[in-house]
Image (tube, grey):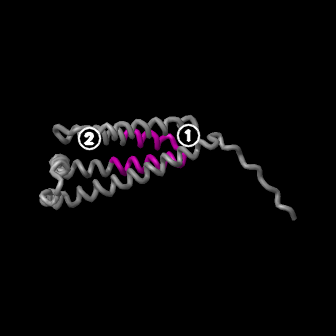
Amino acid sequence: MDEQEQPLAPNPLGPNIILLKILCVFTFVGSGLGLLSYGTIGLIHSFFSSNLALIPDEQNRELIEMMLSAGRLFFFLNAILYAVSFAGAVLLWKMKKMGFHLYTASQLLLLILPLAYIKGFPMPGTNIFLSVVFIWGYSGFLKYMK
């Protein structure tokens, strides 16, 4: 008996699906590291606060001290938002529109959160740029998602 080959259904995204997968992989890495680092700092916040003197570079020490002044809740909220961002990327990988909305909302809140918790926080332009690029990149696939 000859096995008949089933014709493959054409992919409406064509080679562009590779771009979506690349964006998702970068989001998995970035959000996973954000979840891990902010969650860890939230758990052992007092350790970081009491060991600031060990940081040799004064400029970095001041920035870390400024961030630690926001308190544990700030770090836990960031960890939760990074988890939501990660979940959004998982849904985007599965071509679900809900993933875009989760990802976008969490990224916007991650940009706003430091401004709400840390007085005088200098918003890094790189964070804004990367968030806009990723949101724009994912938005190009919305018409193909369910």
State the mark number for residue 104: none
The structure residue drawn at horizontal position 38% and vertical position 51%, both measured from the top left corner, is 31
Residue 28 image position (x, y, % from top left): 43, 52
Residue where numbered disc 1 is placed: 145
Q: Measured along the vertical axis of the image, is residue 7 above or below residue 140?
A: below
Q: Give SS at disc 1.
A: loop
SS for dot 2: helix
User: Which quarter of the picture shows residue 105?
Assistant: top left
Placement of 131 over or under 93, stated as above or below: above
Q: Amino acid at mark 2?
A: Leu
Is the residue 47 above or below the residue 107 in the image? below
**Residue bearing mark 2:** 113
Say left or right for 141 vs 78. right
| Rendering coords of residue 123 (x, y %) | 26, 38
Q: Start and end of the magenta stretch?
A: 81-105
Residue placed farthest to the right in the image? Answer: 1
Name which residue lies at 18% across and 41% down: 118
Instruction: Decide whether the magenta segment is chiefly helix, strand or loop.
Output: helix
Residue 121, located in which quarter of the rendered image?
Answer: top left
The answer to whether residue 133 is left or right of residue 144 is left
